[in-house]
Structure formats: structure tokens, C-alpha cells
Image (cartoon, rainbow, N blue to C red):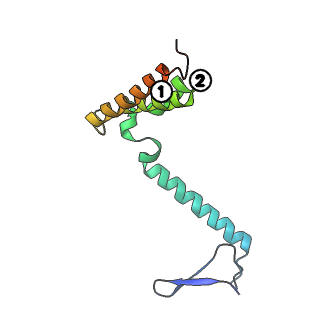
Amino acid sequence: MAHTWKEGFGKEYHYPGEERDDGWTKERQLELFDKVAKEATAKELTKSSSVSAPPHYRFGGNLQTIDLIHEVLSKQQDGFLAYCLGNVFKYLTRFGRKDGLNDLKKALQYLTWCIEHIEKGSISHA
């Protein structure tokens, strides 16, 4: 017998993969469950560009802040410096699009941490 639960007005649901007495196989149920889950995820991501390409990080066409960060910092050996510089780029490029003066203050804070990190001799600089 299948395990079920009731929701709302007595509508009965079955757990994915459970045997049912109406002819549905476990494989068919799981296949349908996967399909619906994938479609819902894809729809949600496409519907909301705030996840993949928020407007405050996009510049004309397909250029995004993440592309700049990747291009400039992907070869950076020092993880802390790369993290801080990435945030400097992020806050400078979104200035005037999201958090105004606070974005500049955040960029300055991360830049200050970069300078302190280099001055402590944590890394060599050119």
C-alpha cells in the first residue's frame, strides 16, 4: 500500500517513487517528478534575472561585472586579495544603480583591506 498524505480539501498525494495501486510504476513517478522539478527550476531562474544577471551588475548587452572580475582576477594567486579586489570592482560598477554612496564606501573599505594586506608583506606586488 502506498504512503499518502492529505492536503487542503482531502486531496491525496503520494510520495515520489512509492508504489501506487493505480498502475503507476516507481520509475514513471520518479521520471515525472524529475521533469516537473527541472522545469520549475528552469522557469524560476529564467523568470528572475535577479539571480543570474541582476540589472545593477549588467552593462549594455551581455557585459556583466562578474565577467570583469573573472577576466582580471582569475589568475590572481592570493585568494584574499582576489576576494577584496573582486568586491572593489563589484561595488564600483554598481554605484549609482543600487546603493549609492554606500557602494563607494564599501569599495573604499575593500580597497583599504587590499592595501593593508599588501603593506603587511603578505604578497609581493609589482
Amino acid type, callout 1: Leu
Give the label on residue 100, or none: none
| Residue under the point 64% across and 62% down | 34
**Of marks 2 and 1, which one's residue comes earlier in the chain?**
1
Residues 68 and 87: in front is: 87
Q: Residues within 10 Å of mark 1 (few under 14, many from 20)?
A: some
Q: Is residue 59 above or below residue 7?
A: above
User: Which SS class for mark 1?
Assistant: helix
What is the CA distance from the residue labelled 2 to the residue labelled 1? Answer: 13 Å
| Residue 18, image x, y percentages | 69, 77
Tell me where residue 36 sits by quadrant.
bottom right
Residues 20 and 117: in front is: 117
| Residue under the point 31% across and 32% down | 105
Name the side, left or right, on which 38 lies relative to 20.
Answer: left
Q: Is residue 39 above or below residue 91?
A: below
Reading the image, the residue beneath label 1 is 68
Give the label on residue 75, or none: 2
Amino acid type, callout 2: Lys
Q: Quadrant of the N terminus?
A: bottom right
| Residue under the point 70% across and 70% down | 28
Q: Residues within 10 Å of mark 2 (few under 14, many from 20)?
A: few
Name the side, left or right, on which 59 lies relative to 117.
Answer: left
Of labels 2 and 1, the one closer to you: 2
